[in-house]
Each structure stands twice: as structure tokens, then as C-alpha cells.
Amino acid sequence: MKTLRIFLLPIATFVFSHSSAQIQQGSWRVGGGASYTHASFESDNSYSSVSLSPSVSYFPIDHLSIGLAFPFSASKGKTGTGEYSNSRYSVGPQVRYYFPFGKWAFFPEVIYSFGKTVSENSGFSTGDPVLYKTETTFSAFRAGAGITYFLNDNVGVEGIIFYQNNEQEVINPFAVVSYEKSINLSLGFQIYLNRK
């Protein structure tokens, strides 16, 4: 057992203390993730959505990045004789802490964003076309964990799995509050700008 500890101690020390240049104090991180969804249902119903999550962050100390995220999503769908589309814009603080090991780094992440959703629904009422437009405000809390693979000193590719909780309030025409909880997977890349 003592021999095993003597063997593992130098490896563990290197793996967990290795500080990658990408995530050192004074560096910047710019990038984001993207996801796409498409689904078709019975009766000619369909749904498609694209989500982007650009962000910019600064490392005030080694391994800790603090910055802003700008999540955006757009979706459209068809239900029976009606169609709808949604656009969602938001901004909020993002905190991430990296645990590097070689060319990889594991990180937990938290984002809290505020934004606006614009929805348009069209259909037919008593044979006449009808268009409804609503605007909602929302706040979204997102917490998850991911892993980054550093291709070089300036580029990393990553995958994140996260839980998201949205609270949405309709501005017009009714005061309605709704809640949406989801588990999501995002893939993306980051560019690291080192001070040296």
C-alpha cells in the first residue's frame, strides 16, 4: 500500500496542480456553445429550434473566470392550421471554475440571465386569418458541469450538461407567470487570449 501511495502521489500532484496557460490570471475567454432541435409529429405538426450562448469572461485568479453570457434562441413550429415563432434574447453574469488535468479541464458553471421573448402565432378563426403577438420578460437560472479539451494554448472545445429553470411573465395581453425546467446538453468552443 505504501508503494502505491508513493507511485500515485507524484502523478496526482502533477495532474491536479498543472496550471494551463489558457486559464491563468489575466487571461480572457471568448466563445460559446450551440444546439439545434427538430421534431416532427403526427398531423403535419413540426418544431425546430436553434440556441446560441456566446460569452466573454476574464480570469481574476488562476482557474476562475467571471464574465457575461448572452443566450439567444429562436424557434418555429406548425400545429394544424397555425404557425408560431419565438425569439428569446438575454444577458447575465457567468461564473466558471476550471480543474485542469493535462490537456483537459473539468468545470462547474453558473449563469443567471434576464431577457425578453417575442412570440408570434398565426392561425384561422371562423375562416379569417388571425395573428397574435406577445412579449414576455423572463429570468433563467442555469447550473451545470462540463469538460474542455485544449487543442492548443488558444482554443478549447467543450461539452456541457446543465439544468435550467426559466421564470417567464407575459407583458401583453395578460399578466401570466409560467415556469419551465429542463436538462440540456451544449457543445461549443472557446478562444483563450493570454496576457503573455
Image: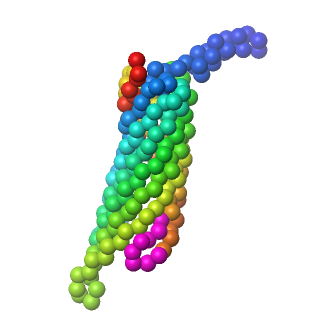
Q: Nearer the viewer, residue 74 or 170?
A: 170
Which quarter of the figure is the C terminus placed in?
top left
Magenta segment's dominant SS is strand
Farthest right residue in view: 2
Q: Is residue 171 magenta?
A: yes
Q: Quadrant of residue 44?
A: bottom left
Residue 37 visible in the displayed image: no
Residue 162's spot in the image, x, y percent?
A: 51, 47
Residue at position x 42%, y 58% in the image: 115
Colouring mode (rainbow / by chain / secondary structure / one colour): rainbow
User: In this picture, is 161 found above or below 63?
Assistant: below
User: In this picture, is 47 found above or below 56?
Assistant: below
Q: Nearer the viewer, residue 41 or 144?
A: 144
Which quarter of the figure is the N terminus placed in?
top right
Farthest left residue in view: 128
Residue 155's spot in the image, x, y percent?
A: 37, 27
Residue 163's spot in the image, x, y percent?
A: 53, 51
Q: Is residue 33 magenta?
A: no
Residue at position x 22%, y 86% in the image: 128
Residue 123 visible in the displayed image: yes
User: In this picture, is 126 found above or below 182?
Assistant: below
Q: How many marks?
A: 0
Residue at position x 47%, y 65% in the image: 168
Q: Nearer the viewer, residue 185 or 33?
A: 33
Residue 61's spot in the image, x, y percent?
A: 54, 27
Report the side of 63 relative to 36 (left or right). Answer: right
Q: Which residues are magenta?
A: 168-175
Residue at position x 49%, y 30% in the image: 59
